[in-house]
Image (cartoon, helix red, strand yellow):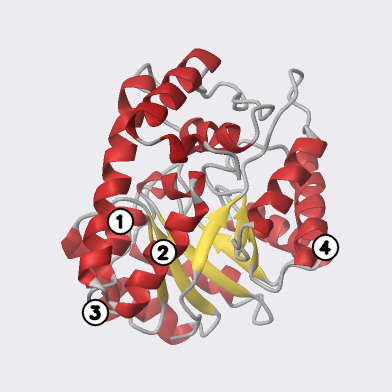
Amino acid sequence: MRLTPCILGTACVPWNDDYTLAEGIFRRQVRRLLSVGFENLYIFGTAGEGHAVTEAQFRQIAAIFFEEMRASTGMCQLGVIGLSVPQVKARVEVGLEIGYRMFQLSLPSWGALNDRELRVFYDEILGAYPQAQFLHYNTGRGLRVLSGRELAALAADHPNLVATKNGRQSIADDLNLMTFAPELCHFFTEQDFAFASRYGACGLLISISSIRPERSHQLFEAGQRRDEEALTRLSGELYRIRQALVPFTASGQHMDGAYDKLYCKIADPDFPLCLLPPYQSSNDEEWRGFVDKLRSIDPAWTGKV
């Protein structure tokens, strides 16, 4: 496997009322994540609004994140969302200039790539930067979710393709990735990880478990041991907590950041919930309802970290 399985987490971007970076809160968030053992972090996926930032914001925030991540011995990863090869390459170049060597790559979302376009996209970008490593963000937001066989074919030509990040898929999809592209480290969110880790080594992409970091670590360690009893117990707890979120985020939010910022605000009540427009965010009333529900299920889930 080209990348050792680990826990991978994201840093969300807090905005002031005028949509400038709330820099102090952002720095505090990264330091907190590192302090609770989340050493492998990235910015500018969907939750980090990599699809929405301007080029000036991209450069500013990437530089600050890289500076804060100097305290980590883990992976510092930069998302490079774009609609064309030139756009993505421009962001990779900014990252390389800052010092990044690990990038998160997603497919253009204006139109689903056909097979020829997919090849050109990967050959042009991965082929241009052999000194860098890439994780493929395997999300439906890119309008095409790649199979294990497709990823294996790309990996055969590009040794710097080392991992994938996957949202909620089917059990069959998870096994397909692990079976046909075993050279890549596949990261799954909590529920999928609890299943997939029974069948092989994989990475944990933290989502709602980030509220209570010890649960993230326990789940990952249970997966490493293939401890089915612990995986079943912990994933069941996380499922109940996730279900508690549903009634308070059912008013139209559809970007990951709308949920992830709720988690950030539990750890830091000053964390603003807004997303860059036009995307709909959660609001303070929904956040308070979610916290009250968590407290009624298990008060430990509302404690600060």
Which dot, 2 or 3, sits closer to the camera? 2
The residue furthest top is: 285
Going by the image, does 160 lie left or right of 73? left
Q: Image quarter for residue 219?
A: bottom left
Please give the name of the residue rendered at 49% of the width and 72% of the height, measured from the top-left corner. Answer: 6
Label 3 crowd (10 A; few <14 / some 14-19 / many >=20): some
Q: Sequence order check: which comes first, mark 1 or mark 4?
A: 4
Label 1 crowd (10 A; few <14 / some 14-19 / many >=20): many
Quadrant of the rendering where the N terminus is positioned:
bottom left
Q: Sequence order check: which comes first, mark 4 or mark 2?
A: 4
The numbered mark at residue 98 is: 4
The numbered mark at residue 179 is: 3
Going by the image, does 116 lie left or right of 176? right
Please give the name of the residue rendered at 35% of the width and 55% of the height, measured from the top-left corner. Answer: 190
Which dot, 4 or 2, sits closer to the camera? 2
Q: Disc 1 designates what residue? A: 234
The numbered mark at residue 83 is: none
Separation of disc 1 and disc 3 at Cα? 25 Å
Q: Tell me whether the residue at label 2 lies in contact with that at label 1, contact meaning CB atoms closer than 8 angstroms.
A: yes
